[in-house]
Amino acid sequence: MGRQVRTHRDPPAKPSLTQRRVALTATFLLLFHLTGDLPVHAGQISAATDSTVEKPSDPELKLPGVTGANVTHSFLSTRVENLARKIDSFFGEDSIYEESSGTYLQTRGSVIYLRGGKFDFDGKFRAKIDLPQLTEKFNLVIESSDKKDTGEEFSRITTGTKPVDEIADAEVAATLQFIIKEKRKWNLSIRPGLKFSDPIESFVKLRFRRTQPLGKTWLSRGTVEVGFFSRQGWENEWELDLERGFGEDYFFRSTSSVLWREEFPGNQFLGQRLLLTHILDRRQSLAFEVGTSAETRPNLRDLSYFSSLRYRRDIHRGWLFLELKPQLLFARENSYRADPALVLTLEALFGARYLD
C-alpha cells in the first residue's frame, strides 16, 4: 500500500475576509507586475540550434509542445528552452500539456513493487480536445485525479493501491480551458470545471506562467496558480524553475514550490526538487531526481525526503513509452526509515502532434 505523508491539521477555522483579500491582492499584483517585459540584451540570447536534424531514414520524434503551427508560446530562442521542452515532452510532464494546444490522449499504468513482495497499482488518463468551432484558445480537458495528501504531491514518488481500490477511489474532472492571453514569454489561462466525486465539486483555476532567460546559459520560469473549490475553498500555488543545459545531452532543473490551502489555516507547504537528465539517444533518457517537502505549522519542519532514477524508452514510434523507476522515500510518519519501491510504467500518448 502506498504511503501518504500526514500533515498537521487544525480545526477548520476560516480565515477572515481581510486575510483573503490580502492574499488575493498580493497574488494579482505580482501577476500583473511580471507581465511587464524585462530588458534583455540581444547578446544574452543565443540563436537556437537544431542538433537533431531530420534524416529520411530516421524521422525526428515530434512531441506536443515541441513543434506544430499552434505551439502555445513560440519563444524558443535559447538552447536551454529547446532542451527543456524536448525533455518535458519526452517524459510526459504536466507543464507541457498545460499550455500545448491541439487534441491528444494520454494514458498511463504503473505497477509498483514494494518491500516484502507486495504490489500496488496506479493509473492515470488525460484527454484534451481542441474546439475549433469556438477559437483555438478553447480546449476541453478530461482527466483523472488521485486522492493524494498535500505532502505527497511534492514528493514525486509514485504510490498506488490495490486495483479494486484504485478504481473505486479514482476521480474524474472535466474542465474548459481558455487561454486569456499569450505572449512570447508569458501565458495566462483560466479553467472552470467539475470534479465528479461524491458529492460533485465545482472549481475554477487561474494560471499564469512567465519565462525569462538569465544570460546565455540559464532560464527561469515562474508559475502562479490560484484556484477556488466549492468544498475545499481557496488555494494558491507558486513555483519557480531554474534551468540550464550542459552540452547537448545533459539538463539540470531546480524547482521550488509553495502551496497554501484554505483548509489548512496558517500552514504553507514547501517543496524543493533537483533534477538531472541525460539524453542517451533520441529514443531513451535517464533522469535522476532528489527532493524534500516541509510545512510551516506548528513550526517549520520537514515532511519527507525522496530520490528516484527514471529510465524511459520510446518503444514504438513516439507514442508508446516504457519506464523503469527505482525510488526511495524517507517520510516523517515512518521515522525517516527508507521505503524502497520499483515502478514499472507503460504510457501511451496519442495525438496528431506526436509524429509528423
Image (cartoon, grey):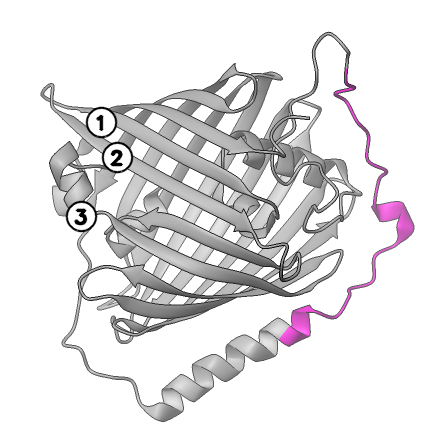
Q: Amino acid at mark 1?
A: Pro
- Asked whether 229 or 127 is in front, the reply is 127
What label sits on residue 169 in the rendered view?
Answer: 3
Circle 1 — which element? strand
The residue sitting at 30% across, 65% down in the picture is 296
- Asked whether 350 or 78 is in front, the reply is 350
Horizontal arrangement in the rendering, residue 276 relative to residue 340 (left or right): right
What label sits on residue 340 in the rendered view?
Answer: 1
Region in magenta: 32-54
Residue 276 x %, y %: 52, 30
Circle 2 — which element? strand
Residue mark closest to the camera, 2 vs 1? 2
Seen in the picture, residue 346 relative to 274 is either above or below; the reply is above
**Residue tagged 2:** 122
Magenta-drawn stretch, dominant element (helix, strand or loop) = loop
Q: Amino acid at mark 2?
A: Asp
Circle 3 — which element? helix
The residue sitting at 18% across, 63% down in the picture is 8
The earlier-in-sequence mark between 2 and 1 is 2
Q: Residues within 10 Å of mark 3 (few under 14, many from 20)?
A: few
Determine the residue located farthest toward the right in the rendered image. Answer: 42
Between the C-alphas of marks 1 and 3, the distance is 24 Å
The earlier-in-sequence mark between 3 and 2 is 2
Can residue 3 be seen by looking at this rendering? no
The earlier-in-sequence mark between 1 and 3 is 3
What label sits on residue 112 in the rendered view?
Answer: none
